[in-house]
Amino acid sequence: MRDKQIEDLKDYKYGFSTDIESIKAPKGLNEDVIKFISNIKKEPKWLLDWRLKAFERLKVLKEPDWQKPKYPKIDYQDLYYYSAPKSFNDKPKSLDELDPKLLETYKKLGIPLQEQKRLNGIAVDAVFDSVSVATTFKETLTKQGIIFCSISEAVQEHPELVKKYLGTVIPLTDHFFATLNSAVFTDGSFVYIPPGVRCPMELSTYFRINASDTGQFERTLIIADKGSYVSYLEGCTAPMRDENQLHAANVELIALEDAEIKYSTVQNWYPGDKDGKGGIYNFVTKRGLCKGNNSKISWTQVETGSAITWKYPSCILKGDNSIGEFYSIAITNNHQKADTGTKMIHLGKNTKSKIISKGISAGYSDMTYRGLVDISPNATNSNNFTQCDSLLMGNKCGAHTVPYIKNKNSDSNIAHEATTSKISEEQLHYCQQRGLNAEEAVGLIVNGFCKEVLQQLPMEFAVEAQKLVGISLEGSVG
Amino acid sequence: MLKISNLSAKIDNKSILQDFKLEINPGEVHAIMGPNGSGKSTLSNILSGKKGYEVTGEVMFENNDLFSLETEERAHKGIFLAFQYPLEIPGVNTNVFLKTSLNAIKKARGEKELDAIQFLKLVKEKAKELKFDEEKLGRQLNVGFSGGEKKKNEILQMSILNPKLSILDETDSGLDIDALKTVADGVNALRKKNNSFLIITHYQRLLEYIKPDFVHVLMNGKIIKSGGPELALELEEKGYEKIN
Amino acid sequence: MEEQLKIDFEKNLKNFSYSDQEKKFKEINFKEFLKQGFPNRKLENWKFSDLSQIIKSNIGELSFYNNYSKENQIEKIELINELEHNKLIIVDGKIVKIDFKFEDKDKIEVLVDQSEKTIRKNINSLINLNNAFSNKFCKIIIKKNYSLKKPLVIYHSTNKNTHFSNTNSRIDFKLEENTCLRVIDIFKDNSEKNFINIYYNFELDKSSILKNYKIDKTINNNVKYSYNNVNQEADSISETFILSSGSKFFKNEINCDLQGQHSSAFVNGIFDLDEENHHEIKSNINHLVENTKSYQLVKSVLEKKSKAVYQGKIFVSSEAQKTDGYQLSNAILLSENSEFNAKPELEIYADDVKCSHGSSSGSLDENSIFYLMSRGLNYKEAKKLLINGFLLDVIEKITDGEIKNLIKDLMGVKE
């Protein structure tokens, strides 16, 4: 098993500069391109048909325009929808070619040199150590019947599962970016936890060796069967350099009876330089379905990167007694913009949801919390609690809170609280009097402000996230 | 150790301190007494480096020009201010705060930083001495603390950071007699031949428990009278109006 | 609808003597309304109340022309006896009487037949509709340093035979420096299935105080929209209280521009809804300069299939440091078919501010009911007592003692 993995990897590594580069779909979005993608991935007909159906739908959908951050018009015919990873010739040759600011951040986060290179797609000879880790990993998981692989692999190996669940939470017809993803998605993760199994470790994209170039239309599908549990980590605290400006991923979670899914994200993609040039548009659709009774889905996100972040990880609480949670820290600095929040749709009886959102804006940035809590007439005895706090640093930035609250059931309770404040001069003076410099003081106070959310992250992630919070706000205190 | 000469301070063009002079030598305890609005808190704010004042004159602390140092640098050099109104910092654990600040000071001084175990040992010891409820150290800094607990927490921080010059800004206000004694015990325990104190207060009460070497009366931004501990008693008796 | 609109608009232009300028103004507004039509749920502000749909299902086809020249049908209007007041009576959108009998004549100037020459800003299509069809509107000016001795009660009434009609009225108020005006709006509906569209403009000069109490208590089958635009200079105060209850549909929209330092705005409201009534309060409080304050409190008690919507927005511009903005809404749903929707929105660009909002909704606390019943009250009494207590909070925010008592009487709320 182990030998084979290493072998594959070698092929992959050397493969790219020769074979793969020659297979690149032509620019533009049309049926042929979609067929091309499907063909290359040797997909079954039902999946191709599914993609084409999405494409048909896409033709009549309009790009939404209600969000706060506006972005320049994207020419969808001017994009490549399938291109194999860039050849080494196009990539930076060494770390010296990178933005020195980026390197400084790596140093502060304590990211190892090899890892820094990998994150920036620099050719490295000895691919990092996690190959062996990943292999042992896989063995442990397989023993318990857990499936953790790329979604392309799952389409080949477990078509019945993919077919059964793909698109059941985010329907083909949902909205422009989600539908675009359905038509052209390239790769992503697939997780299946069998009934009664508690996944023994945090599953992470970090360990999925072939994950480094999943492209801009990532698709993730996680299914927790009856009575199972899984915790999934997405992303990485180190800033990722990426050639694709638009990212429109879809993530679908399905929790069956008594199952629990915990999904944590640390998103730190390139936010653009301090004048707001460049940076990623992160337009992600994430949605979880608590399908069975007593199921639970919990989203935790730390969003510090991207030029524009636009996402609402949501829960559909269909099963009775199901629980949805959303914990979020979003930090914007310089010219970054974020419009993020969640939707909690209560359909089943005795369903509960909790939203804790902490937004921090500094520099010239703009931050919006947008959320929906909808308790339907049948969701008897349900409740929601929302706490949504904003912290402003400077008066060139903005913080907005736009919650939509719909209560259609008299036995259900919704409570929403929101505050906007700033770090007071007095608090800073107090910390500085105790020997901390201004940035340390801000870091400390901000981490305190975010504590309720940081606590939700898996231990090893939490420490890094804490550092990240401080770093993201650097230079924002006068 | 501390030498203040010709210090004047204004805020929004309003003069608060005028031509203020004071010298504190190692090991001395000075008390500054004055009525409300006499400029007591301004003095502690300026010494600790709070922004927003227009200042002239000179303050030397162990041969350093204080005005050229940032707030945290003054702390690194050994100046500690026990705040009249200690700030609440939500979400920040008291222990974490203390450890961060102790290590920041140690680092600035080129001393070895304490690890978690060493730190906890130290903090436990000091908390016990000050009869400070240890359970509170695990809570958010000053959040939900009573007035007395906040003041005691200031003294605990003082004893852990072990400063050279401690400025106590109306630490006695809002304390009952038991808490007052605990606070005084904490201060007395720190009294060594190299540690100095500047106690700012309205009342004579605290000075019964912490015997000062010198007492100064501050009125309208100026020291109008200085003397020994007996001056405090005289003040208590006559009131501020008649002391002149 | 479009056909009818055009005919009615032409009739309106022909039968009243408008100047060319007025005609032009009306035409611009009319075109704008034709383009937009009645607001529907696709517009963010109308997300929870699709007026176009509501008019269609409750009224059907509307006519827009009101023949005011015809002899007035109502001879009497029942006035409120509880307090002495000045009065202004509007029937089918037309002002039929203005009487400031309690005031010094030279302190109040009433300019009738005012008309706006240009569109100040495009607010929504209903304002366009109002501008296109309202008869000439009037402007009331309160002269410097004068406080009105008695409140002004504005009676909104309809003729008995006015049905399926749209009526539009507009009044502008100018409160000069250091003046005080209390305005009470009372609705006396004599007919049903009309769409009543009201537009007030308030200019509050330095240190002036406006208190506006809107009381929609009597049960009626009309659809109503009211828009208050309030511009506030330094040290001015506006207080708006809305009792939203009797109409089939009522949306009250309040826009406050706090453009002078130390100005403040208070918006308080009660939704007391039954049957299938659907009401909304939408507020926009714009903090535009330093040291301004706003406070909003809205409580709802919802029976049967009623539906309440509260959209409250606090906007703080980057210059508006030291803003203090507060907003709270609580709702009690008494029936499993009632519905409460809220969108409490903060949009903040300044960092030294204190802004918060809260919203809660749910059923009546059964434990409290149980407690009261264990003390000898029956279920109905216990419920009534709890609801009174719940609402009293808002009523207590009314700063005018006389009017507070009037509203308490109207609502049957006792302390």
Image: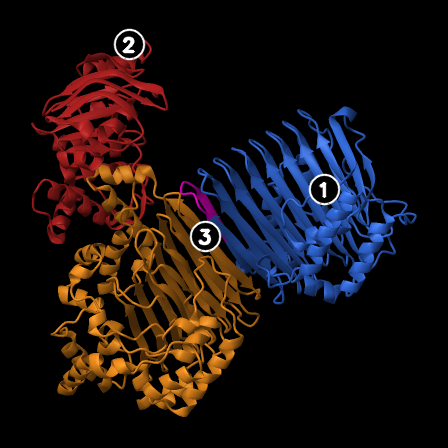
Chain colours: A orange, B red, C blue
Seen as rendered, the residue at the extreme right is C71
| Distance in Å between CA atoms under marks 3 and 2 | 57 Å
* Gap between marks 1 and 3 measured at Cα: 35 Å
Residue A224 marker:
none
Q: Is residue C79 above or below residue C51?
A: above
In reply to whether residue A427 is colored magenta, the answer given is no
Side (left or right) of B106 relative to A372: left
Magenta-highlighted residues: C348-358
* Circle 1: residue type: Glu
Foreground residue, A348 or A261?
A: A261
Q: Residue A205: horizontal and vertical position, in percent?
A: 26, 73
* Occupied quadrant, residue C43: bottom right
Is any atom of residue C100 visible in this view? yes
Q: Are marks 1 and 3 on the same chain?
A: no
Which residue lies at the image location 48% right of the left edge and 70% below the top edge? Answer: A350
The chain carrying label 1 is C
User: Left of A387 or right of it: where is C82?
Assistant: right
Q: Is residue C386 visible?
A: no
Q: Residue shown at 69%/63% (left/top)? A: C52
Question: Label 3: chain?
Answer: A
Q: Is residue C191 above or below residue A216?
A: above
Which residue has dot 3 on it?
A400
Q: Which residue is mark 1?
A: C116
Q: Nearer the viewer, residue B88 or A97?
A: A97
In percent of width and height, residue C105 lies at 78, 26
The residue singled out by tag 2 in the image is B243
The amino acid type, in three-letter code, at marker 3 is His
